[in-house]
Image (spheres, helix red, strand yellow):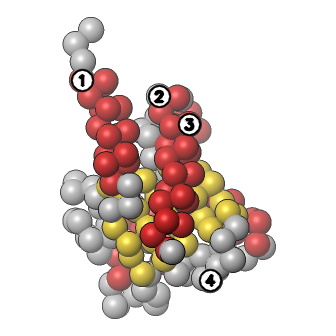
Amino acid sequence: MVVNQDEDYMGLALNEARRAAAMDEVPVGAVVVDKDGAVIGRGYNHPISADDPTAHAEIVALREAARVIGNYRLMGATLYCTIEPCTMCAGAIVQARVARLVFGAPDPKAGAAGSLYNIVTDPRLNHSVEVVRGVLDDECSSLIQSFFASKRRPL
């Protein structure tokens, strides 16, 4: 059943997000899975430690997947990410020709897969992505909310 598979792969993305949290980076994680179910890319947010504004989980995972298959076009692949992608990541998802995007928690302030913008399904672009929202939403939301709550605690 696809739902159980989606939850399993989202669990892997959550593990990546925890790696980011351990580095005191915003806890977002992503994995890319090919059409046969093999994980071909993993990533977690680390723009601060990498001094790289593009080091978002999705971009890191897409880069690794492209290296693994030897092609930037990730035809038939699914990208799992814990938080709805931003505009930069959504654009990269379209350019990579990802078939499916599965995300956990929506991002009402920066989400570009339906919340604020809808880049991944914009018919004016050269590719459209199937989107599945809300997989393990509670776990994904809790992780990022806990992270930001810890930043707001008084010293």
C-beta proximity under 8 Å, tags 4 and 1: no
Q: Earlier in the sequence, mark 4 or mark 3?
A: 3
On screen, residue 49 versus residue 26, left or right, reads right
Helix, strand or loop at disc 3? helix
Classify residue 106 by image quadrant: bottom left
Q: Look at the picture and state if 129 lies above or below 48.
A: below
Q: Which residue is mark 2?
A: 24
Helix, strand or loop at disc 2? loop
Q: Marks 2 and 4, Cα distance to the nearest angstrom?
A: 33 Å
- Mark 3 or mark 2: which is in front? 3
Instruction: Tell me, yes or no, if residue 124 can be seen here.
Output: yes
- Mark seen at residue 75: 4
Q: Label 3 sits on what residue type?
A: Arg
Q: Earlier in the sequence, mark 2 or mark 1?
A: 2
Q: Look at the picture and state if 133 lies above or below 81.
A: below
Q: Which residue is mark 3?
A: 19
**Within 10 angstroms of label 2, few (less than 14), some, or many (20 or more) residues?**
some
Q: Earlier in the sequence, mark 1 or mark 3?
A: 3
Q: Earlier in the sequence, mark 2 or mark 4?
A: 2
The image quadrant where one finds the C terminus is: top left
Q: Which residue is mark 1?
A: 152
Estimate the x, y position of residue 38 in percent, counting from the top left: 70, 67
Could you tell me which residue is drawn at 54 percent across and 66 percent down?
A: 5
Q: Marks 1 and 3, Cα distance to the nearest angstrom?
A: 21 Å
Q: Marks 3 and 2, Cα distance to the nearest angstrom?
A: 9 Å
Q: Marks 2 and 1, Cα distance to the nearest angstrom?
A: 14 Å
